[in-house]
Amino acid sequence: MRTPTISRRGACRFAAALFSGTALAAVRGDEVMYVGGTMQQIPDKTEGKLALDAPNGAEFNCDKGRFTIPYKGIQSLEYGQRSGRRLGVAIAISPIALLSKKRKHFLSIGFKDEKGVGQGAVFELSKGETHKVITALEAKSGKKVEFESDDARKHYEKEGH
């Protein structure tokens, strides 16, 4: 029996479909949002914490449960951004907000779980946590992040300095 795997292109399409419906408010501080993926025990768009200090894997913890991404099972890391106009703010406060953009920061992780089954998870990260999370995952998994665009790469490099 062949175990299901997620191709990078498939993961990107999945992430793009999910991004189109994300909430207006971005995650803040050390919170992350599990935007979606193959972890059926956690509902899409669930906020929680991604603990990177466990020796064997990154642990996503939230009110609705938890799951672990084994470092040795990580097969791909991809960072991307989505910019959107601040329509909600413009309606509530000022049309000037339409001139500004907000960026959301997404990390897609392709991995094999403890049973060797291919899995995928897409997280929205807060602006200040992006570099820290990606650097830790690269170091612990031995995989290098790939960027969905040159803009995403530039932002990541700028945040690290």
Image (cartoon, rainbow, N blue to C red):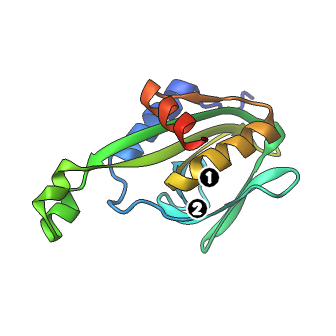
Q: Residue 146's mark?
A: none
Residue 15 horizontal/vertical position (percent): 46, 40
Rendering quarter of residue 160: top right
* 83 displayed left or right of 71: left
What's the amino acid at mark 1? Answer: Met
Q: Is residue 67 visible?
A: yes
Q: Residue at x 51, y 63 (%)?
A: 46
* In the image, residue 159 above or below residue 1: below
* In the image, residue 95 above or below residue 18: below
Residue that mark 2 sits on: 42
Residue 118 horizontal/vertical position (percent): 69, 36
Spatial separation of the CA atoms under disc 1 and disc 2? 6 Å
Q: Residue at x 66, y 49 (%)?
A: 132
* 115 displayed left or right of 152: right
Q: Is residue 116 visible?
A: no
Residue that mark 1 sits on: 39
Asked whether the beta carbons under mark 1 and mark 2 sit within 8 Å of each other, the answer is yes
Front-lying residue, 124 or 65: 124
* In the image, residue 78 above or below residue 70: above
Q: Residue at x 49, y 31 (%)?
A: 154
Q: Residue at x 79, y 38 (%)?
A: 139
Residue 122 horizontal/vertical position (percent): 55, 46
Rendering quarter of residue 6: top right
What's the amino acid at mark 2? Answer: Ile
Classed neighbour count for the residue bearing mark 1: other residues with Cα under 10 Å, few (<14), some (14–19), many (≥20): some
Is label 2 in a helix, a strand or a loop? Answer: loop
Is label 1 in a helix, a strand or a loop? Answer: loop
